[in-house]
Image: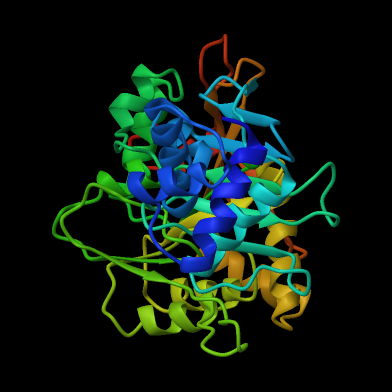
Amino acid sequence: MTPELLDRVRDRLAVTGAEPTPALVAAALRADGRVYGDSIVLAVVAALHREAMGVGPLDSLLAEPGVTDILVNGPDEVHIDRGAGLERVFVRTGDDAAIRRLATRLAAAAGRRLDDATPYADVRLPDGTRFHAILAPIAAPGTCLSLRIPARKGFTLESLIAAGSLPADGAQLLHNLLATRKAFLISGGTGTGKTTLLAALLSAVDPAERIVVVEDAGELRPDHPHVVRLEARPANVEGAGEISLRALVRQALRMRPDRLVIGEVRGPEVVDLLTALNTGHEGGCGTIHANSPADVPARLEALGALAGLPRDAVHSQVASALQAVVHLTRLSNGVRRISSIHALHRLPSGEVVTRPVADFPANAPTTFHPPAALFAGAA
């Protein structure tokens, strides 16, 4: 079966709009004036079904255990991450037109427009997979697809210890962080496991507490009996119907949350989160992109500026709203690991800085620092 043959069958079936059944595919093949065996007919049927459903030629990778990311960089260039870094795999995706059709269909199914006028889209597929596409020629060497696959099973703090992502004494610190209802952020770069750790921590929250989660794209699936999830919605193809994270944070505050969680703090909603944590909503948490724990105050300052909050006001809010930062890194071998826990401290100047509570070197014992007293029974 060649791409040219598949294109001819696709074009013939497109005239009638019929489903690619074996009988119709066989009839379309006969129009070529050649005789094809059953294996070719079934292969064409399977290929057309993959195009019409699921993620086409990437379906087998999506179903493979352990795969967390699938990246397509133009025709026939596919990389996956099984947890040990990116590796290239051979998957025949077809030409750029085929990748573009797949991207357009997936975006349309989620109510998003993807064409030359709007050449990129970020959506969540029905199975929870985060899907991003950007079309050529904006992207080179061709249309690029990125799929972030949600964890198929939830992690606990104990399973993170077993995986080498968390030392046992670090788990005790995190349990104390939850028990004392400290507000905290989990920081780190892309793909360091922030969402995985946050879900594990929320799974350890007292079952009697009500957790309200606000996310841009629904990824958090904590194993907890009382979780309400609110998910933002982008504007539709007419530019209407957008529901922002900031609006959802405000709604969440009216839902009597014991813990308010923002999946990722990335914009003006940081102001509403800080306001909530300063008005009696203890134990709130979320994730944030930052290169190090020490960079988190500056990152919050930048996000607060997006909402028009001056620098000194941001630092005042942060000083009373947040108590800790848990930072994650990804080692050269692909292992995601908690590297440190910091406490937030306000200087006489009013500026907020972080100070280490505990450091977790990859090949050395944990180092505790005096601020560890912030967490009852931590040291």
Q: Position of residue 268 (x, y in %)?
A: 64, 76
Would residue 196 be visible to someone looking at this image?
no
Q: Position of residue 318 (x, y in %)?
A: 60, 66
Name above or below for residue 117 compared with residue 51: below
Q: Position of residue 358 (x, y in %)?
A: 53, 30
Name above or below for residue 372 compared with residue 177: above
Identify which residue, 55 or 328, lies in the foreground: 55
Q: Residue at x 55, y 45 (%)?
A: 147
Q: Residue at x 71, y 51 (%)?
A: 97
Quadrant assignment, res 256: bottom left
Q: Residue at x 76, y 79 (%)?
A: 310
Task: Please identify the quadrant where the N terminus is shown.
Answer: top right
Tell whether 59 sits left or right of 311. left
Name above or below for residue 293 compared with residue 228: above
Would residue 217 be visible to someone looking at this image?
yes
Residue with the most extreme front position = 33
Identify which residue, 72 or 358, lies in the foreground: 72
Quadrant assignment, res 6: top right
Q: Position of residue 169 (x, y in %)?
A: 38, 23
Q: How is the image coloured?
A: rainbow
Task: Please identify the quadrant where the C terminus is shown.
Answer: top left
